Image (cartoon, helix red, strand yellow):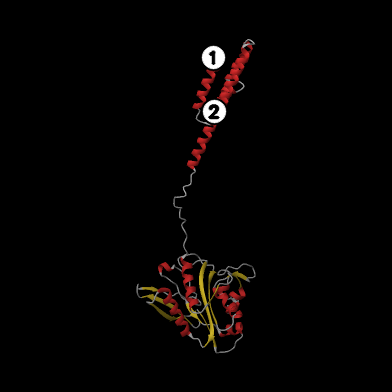
Amino acid sequence: MKEQLEHLAAESLEAVAAANDMAALDALRVKYLGKKGALTAILKQMGRLSAEERPAMGQLANSVRAELEAALDGRRAELEAAAMEARLEAEALDVTLPGKRTRAGRKHPMDVVIDELKDIFVGMGFEIDDGPEVEESVYNFDRLNTDEGHPAREWTDTFYLDEESRTLLRTQTSNMEPRIMETRELPIRAAVFGRCYRKDEVDATHSPMFHQMEGVVVDEHITFADLKGLLHNMAVQLYGPNTVTRFRPHHTYPSFALGSSLSSTGMTLSSTCIYALESIFCLSRLYRSLSYSTAISYHPHMVDSLMMIPDSRYCCIRR
């Protein structure tokens, strides 16, 4: 029995030292120290020993058990330390390395042009407005002399939000003109930028949502000459000192269409005749392309009804 215990001790310690993972170590613990393990099988032979031999064999068996348990615990600690070291190495964060640069986005070309135009108009003494995109028909149509029955008020052209045709997505930034004239003191110089909505089919030049810029000036002794000078100045600041502008009569009530050419590049910017000078930016500034439309003056009836200043000295122009 003594030889069996000594052989068991040597074999088990060698096996424990060679264990490479926790699963193998647990299997060795069950093999040698479990209820059906090798040491238990040897201890079952204690009944065959004499009374004099039992104490010595019992002491030797306890010594083997203690030595094996210590070896198992020691090997477990080694394996846990090795696993932790491997994990730390795999998950190590080298703070000396440069960080990964986050790629920042850029402004949309539309916003770039709009911001430039805002700066230009602020430099000419204008206040910048935005206004509601969900609008009442009274401001979008009635107070702009667009009465019931006008084609622009048809459901096929306008996004109405109620069956009574009282609330809609604004079709033009002109909805801000009556609001401005109702609330501002004279003289008035205001520019409006924002999104508008119309039931247009999507193609190369149309979209159900588009941007407009709108301007209004109400002051004494202003004429179309002031409007032409302002628009020429806007084009020069936007496109450069070599920009040439052209003004042509248009079919709407007193109005003209504006076109520009860049003499340095030979590029001509054709004018698009649309009600009021709604500068619609169809292409980005990157392509140096701008679609202009017409410039008109207000009907006196509208100015009088909105501002109640039936004084011919005050003139009002839209851009």
Near mark 1 (Cα within 10 A), the count class, few <14, some 14-19 or many ≥20, is few
In 3D space, how far apart are the residues under numbered discs 1 and 2 (Cα atoms)?
25 Å
Residue 14 in the image: x percent, y percent?
50, 23
Label 2's element?
A: helix
Residue marked by disc 2? 25
Please name the amino acid that badge 2 sits on: Leu
Q: From the viewer's side, name the closer residue of 274 and 31.
A: 31
Q: From the viewer's side, name the closer residue of 285 and 289.
A: 285
Is residue 219 visible in the rendered structure shown here?
yes
Please indicate whether residue 290 sits to the left or right of residue 191 in the image: left
Q: Which one is earlier in the sequence, the residue at label 1 or at label 2?
A: 1
| Front label number (1 vs 2) | 1
Q: From the viewer's side, name the closer residue of 302 and 91.
A: 91
Image quarter in which the N terminus is found: top right
> How many numbered discs, if any?
2
**Residue 268 image-quadrant placement:** bottom left
Residue marked by disc 1? 3
